[in-house]
Amino acid sequence: MEAAAISGSRGICFLYSSPNGKRTLLNRSMAAQKPVPSAAKTVSSRKNSTVFPLGEKGPRNSPLVTSPPIKLLTRVEELKLLSKAEKAGLLSAAEKFGLSLSTIEKLGLLSKAEELGVLSAATDPGTPGALFSLSLGLLLLGPSCVYLVPEDYPWEIVLQVAVALVSVVGGSAAFAASNLVSNLQKSK
């Protein structure tokens, strides 16, 4: 006896084929009453149905598989990010602090960033949402700390200021990074 699972408009059904050629289509509740054969072969599919053998994973509709790959350098070129950074004076400021392309190469910063997953995260579709959630959390942390921490001792005031400063700087950076990664991942 051969069996196959069929995914269609009625949900998942099971198609049993006996050696004499007789085929029986069962839904899940009916199929649970029959023993599942150990070996299954794919049989012909019906219109608007997908057939896959029992015991194997069925077809998956994954947005990651159907979306085109993200080409970061192409998007950087399209958005003219390096030209904008040059006009803003960021490249010359980085050089003044000793951070040039040759320094980046000597220190192996790009390979270290790839080892840490920073460059891979830029192509992950979930990264902009995660960064945005982080930014909201940080931006809510500062006012919450100022409101909840009492001001009885000087160290509590210092704690309020430090947490507020970290939350504003970190939340703003995470929000900007979320927007940047989202723009890099957009296709034309």
Image: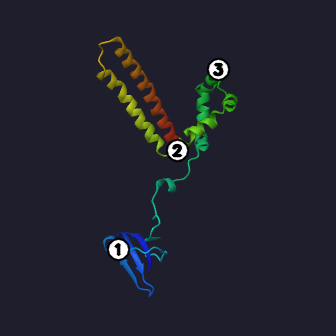
Viewer-closest of 182 and 64: 64
Query: Earlier along the polypeptide chain: callout 2 or callout 3?
Result: 3
Give me the disc on residue 96. 3
Q: Write down the residue under mark 2.
A: 185
Viewer-closest of 185 and 88: 185
Instruction: Determine whether the residue tagged by mark 2 lies in a helix, strand or loop.
Output: helix
Query: Earlier along the polypeptide chain: callout 1 or callout 3?
Result: 1
Give me the disc on residue 31. 1
Q: Identify the residue shown where x is 57% and y is 40%.
A: 119
Viewer-closest of 154 and 32: 32
Q: Where is residue 137 in the image (x, y as percent from the top left)?
A: 38, 33
Q: Identify the residue shown where x is 48% and y is 41%.
A: 127
Q: Distance between the residues labelled 2 and 1?
A: 45 Å
Q: Where is residue 66 in the image (x, y as percent from the top left)?
A: 51, 56
Indicate which label's residue lies in the foreground, 1 or 3: 1
Q: What residue type is labelled 2?
A: Gln
- Give the residue at the far bottom of this rendering: 20
Instruction: Determine whether the residue tagged by mark 1 lies in a helix, strand or loop.
Output: helix
